[in-house]
């Protein structure tokens, strides 16, 4: 609903209020207690106003005009049976007055009314009632000597003049002072206690009114309506968020790739979660200062550290749509669209890898959970139980990602022996060493069962000889798992398909779309060649899910992964691929391969000692001055990393290879282009010169 519609609704509600009041006054029934018909109008109007406030904010003059704002104020003034609304509205109305959206007089009169109902002195003298002698007088006033000064700031006449005018008006009004003042006072006290304005008196406490669960529900509903903002409030929230994102993207080329802010994020602690919220503008300012700025700018093209994440805008839009619709993506019965979309994407990845039609998988939160899913499947497919773990052997290299060892421990196989297979000078697994290791272990009475190869290690980007390893694993009846979290999507390039030859012969594979497809963080695809062992390891159900088991036409992600509560991750992946096609992704990935080779050549020309030629898009190198000791070289390279982080123009990282402190560059951010690589080389030259040779 837009503000023009709100204005018409407010005017209609105010008119209904005044019409009913006039009718009741005319027949003499208005002044004998709070007439049920009048209260019904007041309550209905109050409920609707509360919804408008929660959805779109206070309807002030800029939003609904002077008459609409006055109608809103009239409605809240008359919501006398709903103290929660009046109390909640007061600070909102005060903020509106500070913005100039409503007259300050409206705030003053609402505050006086609240104080009077609560039994506290009013501040401005706007509330009158009959006293015990039947005389109309102001209700008690705080600081009576200063009341006229306060009234003057609101444009009100002195209190004495206002009182005289009120007495003249009531003389012509059919309302008269009650015949039994004390009885009226007791009734008023009872009513004030019953609706929640004041603690009930002892007499009332002895005969309390029956609580009405509907009134409590209505009160709670009204308090919770802030969770459902209306069109105007959504627009304000959305405009603030989009404005922040646009400011960020406009500056992305000039922002530091690493901003070494002292105590980054500490300002968040100054604003703890409280009962009342704060304006979206203040929230955005806090997020930009304390969250977006400090540390690594992973959206920057200068992010050349670790394995860069993505963050393409199309993926962010997919996340937005997924979060707004909040479709459940775990079980086909509840979310057929999201589940079909995820299965479609898993099938696309399976085809990319070269798996048969029997393959299945899921989109997990990342490579760690994806590896865990594959390892649990491999464990169960080999029929391993607790008593078998100590003799079960896993084969991998020292370059395998640490999430593999973590997954084995979480899967209960911390006792399993991990045989580290030797690597060649380029840090790739040596097939002949694997074959020998398996033979040796069998001779020792052990049980080889799992071989793990890497299609792009994190340290060096090395790709193990997958085809040769697949042959050995098949001969030895071992499950063959490929961790291609980093390198898998290079299959979209001609070079990558050749480099990863043999991946199609694996039993399971992991690829991270938030790496090679440049999606926002939080997506890792696991695919298993045969769906049956995957389903056998992960399908569980509770009786409360019996309805969800009626339709088995599609595999549900909850049946092939550890997750039951599942975010609709597929949309962030599907939307960019459908909008753009695969060509831009292939081009970007091929560009990164060439940028790595370019960096390798340029950093070598700059005098740095080079590691192996890159298999994919990671390059290792270090500054090794002639004559410097190994310990000194390590110190020098540590200093280069530290100085580059302080500089911040590019974000570089390091690792240890064979005891040597080694620098590394990873080109995978979609915003990384040749000028970024040239800048990185320049920064490294500068830092090496600053550190010196000795």
Image (cartoon, grey):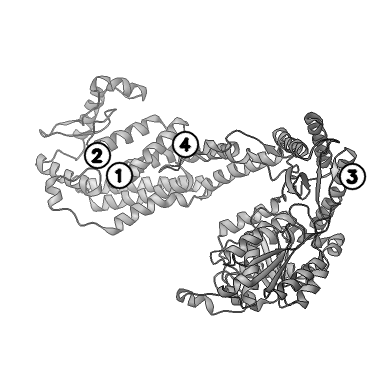
Residue 61 — which label?
4
In 3D space, how far apart are the residues under numbered discs 2 and 1 (Cα atoms)? Answer: 9 Å
* Residue 90 x/y as whole percent: 37, 38
Question: Does the residue at mark 2 contact the one at mark 1 (Cβ under 8 Å)?
Answer: yes
**Circle nearer the viewer, 3 or 2:** 3
Sequence-wise first label, 1 or 3: 1
Residue 252 falls left or right of residue 225: right
Q: Label 3: state its secondary structure.
A: helix
- Between 352 and 3, the residue placed more toward the observer is 352
In 3D space, how far apart are the residues under numbered discs 3 and 4 (Cα atoms)? Answer: 67 Å
* Residue 439 x/y as whole percent: 76, 73
- Between 692 and 541, the residue placed more toward the observer is 692
Q: Give the labeled residue for mark 3.
A: 601
Residue 690 falls left or right of residue 510: right
Q: Give the labeled residue for mark 1.
A: 83
Question: Does the residue at mark 3 contact the one at mark 2 (Cβ under 8 Å)?
Answer: no
Question: Does the residue at mark 1 contact the one at mark 4 (Cβ under 8 Å)?
Answer: no
Residue 117 — which label?
2
| Res 348 → quadrant | bottom right
């Amino acid at each position: 609903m837009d503000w023009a519609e709100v204005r018409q609704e407010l005017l209609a509600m105010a008119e209904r209020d005044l019409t009913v009041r006039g009718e009741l006054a005319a027949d003499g029934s208005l002044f004998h207690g709070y007439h049920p018909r009048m209260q019904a109008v007041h309550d209905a109007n109050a409920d609707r106003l509360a919804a408008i406030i929660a959805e779109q904010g206070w309807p002030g003059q800029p939003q609904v005009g002077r008459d609409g704002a006055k109608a809103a104020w009239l409605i809240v003034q008359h919501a006398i049976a709903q103290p929660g609304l009046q109390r909640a509205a007061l600070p909102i109305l005060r903020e509106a007055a500070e913005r100039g959206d409503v007259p300050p007089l409206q705030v003053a009169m609402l505050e006086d009314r609240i104080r009077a109902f609560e039994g506290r002195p009013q501040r401005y003298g706007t509330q009158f009632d009959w006293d015990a002698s039947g005389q109309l007088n102001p209700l008690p006033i705080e600081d009576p000597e200063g009341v006229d000064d306060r009234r003057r700031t609101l444009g009100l006449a002195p209190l004495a003049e206002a009182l005289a005018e009120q007495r003249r008006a009531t003389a012509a009004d059919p309302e008269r002072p009650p015949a039994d003042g004390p009885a009226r006072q007791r009734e008023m006290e009872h009513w004030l206690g019953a609706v929640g304005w004041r603690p009930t008196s002892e007499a009332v406490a002895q005969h309390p009114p029956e609580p009405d669960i509907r009134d409590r529900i209505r009160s709670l509903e009204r308090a919770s309506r802030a969770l459902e903002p209306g069109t105007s409030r959504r627009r304000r929230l959305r405009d603030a968020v989009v404005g922040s994102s646009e400011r960020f993207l406009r500056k992305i080329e000039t922002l530091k790739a690493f901003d070494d802010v002292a105590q980054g994020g500490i300002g968040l602690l100054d604003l703890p979660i409280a009962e009342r919220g704060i304006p979206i503008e203040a929230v955005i300012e806090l997020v930009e200062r304390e969250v977006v700025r400090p540390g690594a700018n992973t959206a920057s093209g200068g992010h050349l550290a670790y394995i860069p994440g993505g963050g393409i805008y199309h993926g962010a839009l997919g996340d937005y749509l997924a979060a707004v619709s909040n479709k459940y993506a775990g079980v086909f019965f509840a979310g057929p669209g999201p589940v079909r979309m995820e299965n479609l994407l898993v099938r696309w990845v399976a085809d990319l890898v070269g798996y048969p039609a029997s393959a299945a998988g899921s989109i997990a939160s990342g490579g760690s959970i994806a590896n865990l899913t594959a390892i649990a499947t491999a464990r169960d497919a080999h029929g391993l139980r607790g008593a078998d773990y100590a003799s079960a052997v896993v084969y991998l290299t020292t370059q395998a990602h640490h999430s593999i060892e973590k997954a084995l421990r979480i899967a209960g196989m911390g006792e399993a022996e991990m045989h580290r297979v030797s690597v060649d000078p380029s840090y790739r697994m040596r097939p002949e060493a694997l074959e020998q290791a398996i033979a040796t272990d069998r001779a020792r009475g052990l049980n080889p069962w799992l071989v793990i190869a890497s299609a792009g290690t994190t340290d060096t980007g090395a790709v193990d000889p997958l085809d040769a390893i697949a042959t050995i694993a098949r001969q030895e009846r071992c499950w063959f798992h490929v961790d291609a979290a980093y390198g898998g999507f290079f299959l979209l390039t001609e070079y990558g398909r050749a480099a990863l030859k043999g991946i199609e012969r694996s039993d399971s594979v992991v690829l991270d779309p938030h790496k090679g497809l440049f999606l926002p963080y939080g997506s890792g695809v696991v695919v298993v060649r045969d769906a049956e062992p995957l389903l056998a390891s992960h399908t569980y159900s509770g009786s409360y899910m019996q309805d969800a088991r009626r339709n088995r036409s599609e595999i549900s992600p909850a049946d092939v992964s550890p997750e039951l509560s599942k975010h609709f991750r597929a949309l962030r992946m599907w939307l960019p691929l459908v909008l753009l096609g695969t060509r831009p992704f292939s081009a970007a990935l091929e560009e990164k391969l060439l940028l790595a080779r370019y960096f390798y050549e340029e950093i070598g020309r700059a005098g740095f000692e080079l590691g192996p030629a890159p298999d994919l898009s990671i390059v290792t190198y270090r500054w090794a001055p002639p004559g410097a000791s190994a310990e000194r070289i390590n110190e020098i390279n540590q200093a280069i990393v530290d100085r580059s982080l302080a500089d911040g123009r590019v974000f570089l990282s390091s690792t240890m290879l064979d005891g040597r402190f080694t620098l590394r560059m990873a080109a995978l951010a979609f915003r990384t282009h040749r000028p970024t690589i040239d800048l990185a080389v320049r920064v490294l030259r500068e830092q090496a010169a600053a550190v010196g040779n000795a």
